[in-house]
Amino acid sequence: MMKKKPAPKWISIGAASAILLAAVSGGSAYAAAPFGDLNRVPEASKIRALQQAGLVHGSADGQFRPQGTLTNAQAIRLVVDTFDLDLGGLQFVRKPEASDYFSKADDQAWYAEALVIASYNDLDLPKDLDPNAAATRASFVSLLIRAGQNESALPVFKLIPVRITDEASIPDGSSGTMQEALAFGLLELDDQGNIRPNEQLTRAAAADILYRAAVLANVIAEQ
């Protein structure tokens, strides 16, 4: 299991009852009705498998909105839920707020608790993260791999790098992670050998990546 980083100024005073974390888009105790907008969506079977596992959720009208853009906040919530991240059963002198870690976070927003959990679990998120901005291929797989390896759900290994045509467009410090994403099968190169790291993700494309990671980490069984 991962090492928890030391608690900041709101020092832990025990491991009794933690603050209640309302999983706004977390796992559900009941079977949700199938999404009604997945006809002719190539990733439909994977989306349904993730829904049955309680890892993806739609809108109140029962739609998944597969062509909608995945936001950073949604990406973080998916990773927190997939790897069952939490605050380690700690109780705090002062309730931690998302804005303690992320300057653009809204402490009253649905994603606030997920951001606190992500920060505590060392997912290497920038302080100026915009929760409402679009997630990219690179940012989402980086979160998945970091969380999976922290939780010992994904292996850490040395690999022989493959040639990536658009290597120069990979965000600083993420080249190794992109190589791991290729090795894990989370991403694939296109016909020109590009990995397209800064391409925004639709919710359907993100579900495809999430499904692959969840199967690899034995969170769900392959369908």
Image (cartoon, helix red, strand yellow):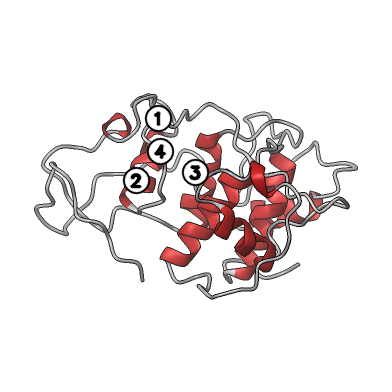
* Residue at numbered disc 2: 119
Q: Residue at x 26, y 33 (%)?
A: 100
Circle 1 residue: 128
Q: Quadrant of the N terminus?
A: bottom left
Position above or below: 42 against 136: below
Element type at mark 2: helix
Q: Residue at x 23, y 38 (%)?
A: 96
Disc 3 marks a residue whose amino acid type is: Arg
Q: How far apart, in angstroms, are the residues tagged by discs 3 and 4?
A: 16 Å
Query: Residue at 52% of width from left, 26% of height from top?
Result: 132
The disc, 3 or 2, on the residue closer to the chain's N-terminal end is 3
Expressed as whole percent of the image width and height from the top left, the position of residue 109 reads: 41, 26
Would you name the residue on which mark 3 appears?
Answer: 77
* Residue 46, visible in the rendered structure: yes
Tell me if 103 is positioned left or right of 177 in this view: left
Q: Secondary structure at mark 1?
A: loop
Badge 1: residue crowd in 10 Å (few <14, some 14–19, many ≥20): few
The answer to whether residue 33 is seen in the rendering is no
